Amino acid sequence: MARIIAIANQKGGVGKTTTCVNLAASLAAMRQRILLVDLDPQGNATMGSGIDKHALEHSVYDVLVHQVPARQVIQPTGEAGFDVLPANGDLTAAEVELLQVDNREQRLRAGLAQVAGGYDYVLIDCPPSLNMLTLNAMVAADGVIIAMQCEYFALEGLSALVGTIQRVAETVNPKLQIEGILRTMYDPRNSLTNDVSAQLHIHFGDGVYCTVVPRNVRLAEAPSHGVPAM
């Protein structure tokens, strides 16, 4: 059975999607069977994996709202070596439509249960908000990687996200845990970067990954070509 990991942060533009796509490509290069789940209505992980979100017959929206089997929606990426449960703008409506259904926070978990046995890892790219889609990701996941920039306001948002993860673990998904905090767009020449890093280490200790994602032109350009940077 796959280990399911959500990459989350309610703040946009922190490198969640870049992390998710390139982690999927890296694990696939290590001969792991990978499914990337795009839970962001912007569909950036879908496009960044080389799949045209405008040409989809079905998307993760149909899995969540209409309970279409995930295996009918999953698409391969070809050279990148992993599969994608894609998203497009239809997913915007899921937030409202899920409020009308039973077990709304369990829909993604149920959909993935049908296919998880065929993968080693399932990586979920969460939307930049603490909404019903993110809640579905956390209920389905075994762990959460928090991607964050070393900025002052990021610390405020981090406490809200950690609180949400703890509440989900206490009430719905007791196996859920924080895998680690990944510092993205990292610039060690910036004093604020170093100050925020120090605060993270004080509060989370070994929960802060030693690995950082630096600012990198190649990482920024790769999505426009529909391929991972790896």
Image: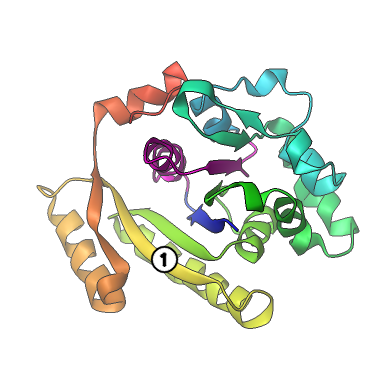
- From the viewer's side, name the closer residue of 112 and 1: 1
Residue 161 drawn above or below residue 148: below
Please tell me how crowded label 1 is: few (under 14), some (14-19), or many (20+) other residues with Cα within 10 Å.
some
Q: Percent position (x, y) of residue 47?
A: 55, 25
Q: Residue furthest left?
A: 189
Residue 41 drawn above or below residue 229: below
Would you say residue 93 is visible in this rendering?
no
Question: For residue 13, what is the image quadrant?
Answer: top left
Q: Which amino acid does label 1 sit on?
A: Glu
Residue 213 drawn above or below residue 129: above
Residue denoted by label 1 = 179
- From the viewer's side, name the closer residue of 230 and 7: 230
Judge whether residue 71 is colored magenta: no
Q: Residue furthest bottom?
A: 170
Residue at 41% across, 38% down: 18
Is the C terminus in the top left, top right, bottom left or bottom right quadrant? top left
- Disc 1, SS: strand
- Name the colouring of the figure: rainbow
Residue at 74% across, 39% down: 71
- From the viewer's side, name the closer residue of 191 and 113: 113
Residue at 85% across, 47% down: 67
Question: For residue 170, what is the image quadrant?
Answer: bottom right
Would you say residue 227 is visible in this rendering?
yes
Is the N terminus in the top left, top right, bottom left or bottom right quadrant? bottom right
* Residue interval drawn in magenta: 12-41
Judge whether residue 24 is colored magenta: yes
Q: Percent position (x, y) of residue 73?
A: 74, 34
Direction from residue 27 to residue 38 in the image, left or right: right
All told, the count of numbered labels is 1
